[in-house]
Amino acid sequence: MPSRPIVLVHGYSDQGESFKAWQEALTQRGYDATTIHLGNYVSLSNEITIKDIAEGFERALQNCALKDGSPFDAIVHSTGMLVLREWLAGTTNEDNEIAERRQARLKHLIGLAPATFGSPMAHKGRSWLGAVFKGSKVPGPDFMEAGDLVLSGLELGSGYTWDLAHRDFFADPAVYGRSAATPYPFIFVGLRDYGALGRLATDPGTDGTVRWAGVGFNSRKINVNLTIEPTRRQRITIEPWKNVAVPQVFLPDLNHGTILREPSKALVDMVLEALDVASGPQYEAWAAKHCARNAAALKSRRARRWQQLIVRATDERGDGISDYFVELGTVADRRFRRLREFDMHVHAYSENRSYRCFHVDLDRLKPENHKALALRVIASSGTELVGYHGFNSDDGLDVPARERNKWDAIIEFDASIGSKDVKFFYPYTTTLVELRMNREPMPLNQGSHVFWFGG
């Protein structure tokens, strides 16, 4: 019999009632209905943030049967994952003690089509059409509001999901570790979309709402620091991965809606088995058993290999660079050859264009055919008074002529990125890339036009 209560947390613009099928499935498998807690939260108010909802979740725990601080499990759908991750991670150093208590309390985190890195639908929801179709229809101050701040966090490449990933995926100590002292996460996503009509409104490589490459926890962070003049090994680094390898299961016959409202018996069985995991070896055994089916599921749906990359460009002060362009390519005969498939699907975050989200079809790009990867970065300040610059950025390669306020350079990747241990291309995952360069008064190497002495 189940030994812990379970909370169910819905997604954006939804309500707890949408978990009815899961509530019934759990009670049929032995859960006492009084231990199943259906969460509800406001998402269609323009003044509410995901952090507000996470704080509201904590208040709700303190005012229900879970107020005694007892351990519990969670099943979350879509945006519900961001709510639980925010609650787990904490926001400041002073929250570390609180975060550790929360991480020890939550035993299992089941993600059903989680919006781990947002959704391509979010920026569309922020338009007037989003207000018409998704906006609150309840008369009052929130009438026709579609939850702009929540949608901002859900937008592809948002500053919020970038920051949250640094607070849990790349945190030290690990938020999702290898023992029962932290939650055991499990990710499930459907391979179907909403059909022919739905494909007119969303991206390929999705379950209709979230990207296959944007739901998982297993991410990589690559730092390209051009503000110093060190060796290449120091200039391009990869953040260490502290968390456990989190299993991600693909479901061939479900989409973003049916995974919640019409879960298959096989899915319910896998989730219940996941809720029984109590140790690192059991967790790894569960992953080996169920992830082994992924190849067959992907093949059955003819799913293409999509990867997501989120790039942020900043100067040495940490200020974002909004006017820049990134190309991925190869170097041969000391010349850069662009891989055109890399930037076919790119979205700039609407509130801060220093963040860019790339969705790459690896079946079209064919990374196995390319060696000697390199980045071409073009950055402009918009004025001849200041410009961007990186040390040793072209490395003697042939690069186009530079305009006075535009920096155009090619950076060869460190050999470790192309090694057997670390792959740059990895399907169905998200990679974060942070580019940092110097912002300098112009012209370089002489008195600038920004400040001088004399008349």
Image (cartoon, helix red, strand yellow):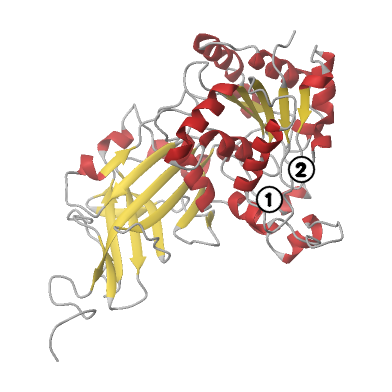
- The answer to whether any part of residue 437 appears in the image is yes
Point 63% across, 20% down: residue = 71
Point 25% across, 53% down: residue = 226
Q: Position of residue 14 (x, y in %)?
A: 78, 43
Element type where label 1 sits in the image: loop
What's the mark number on residue 107? none
The amino acid type of the residue labelled 2 equals Tyr
Point 50% across, 13% down: residue = 280
Furthest residue in direction bottom, as rendered: 455
What's the mark number on residue 202? 1
User: Based on the displayed image, in which of its 4 quarters is residue 297 positioned?
Assistant: top right
| Count of number-bearing discs | 2
- Badges 2 and 1: C-beta atoms under 8 Å apart? yes
Between 74 and 339, the one nearer to me in the picture: 74
Q: CA distance from mark 2 to mark 1?
A: 9 Å
Between 279 and 92, the one nearer to me in the picture: 92
Residue 372 appears left or right of 133: left
Q: Position of residue 326 (x, y in %)?
A: 40, 57
Q: Closer to the N terminus: mark 2 or mark 1?
A: 2
Residue at numbered disc 2:
194
- Judge whether 255 appears above or below 103 on screen: below
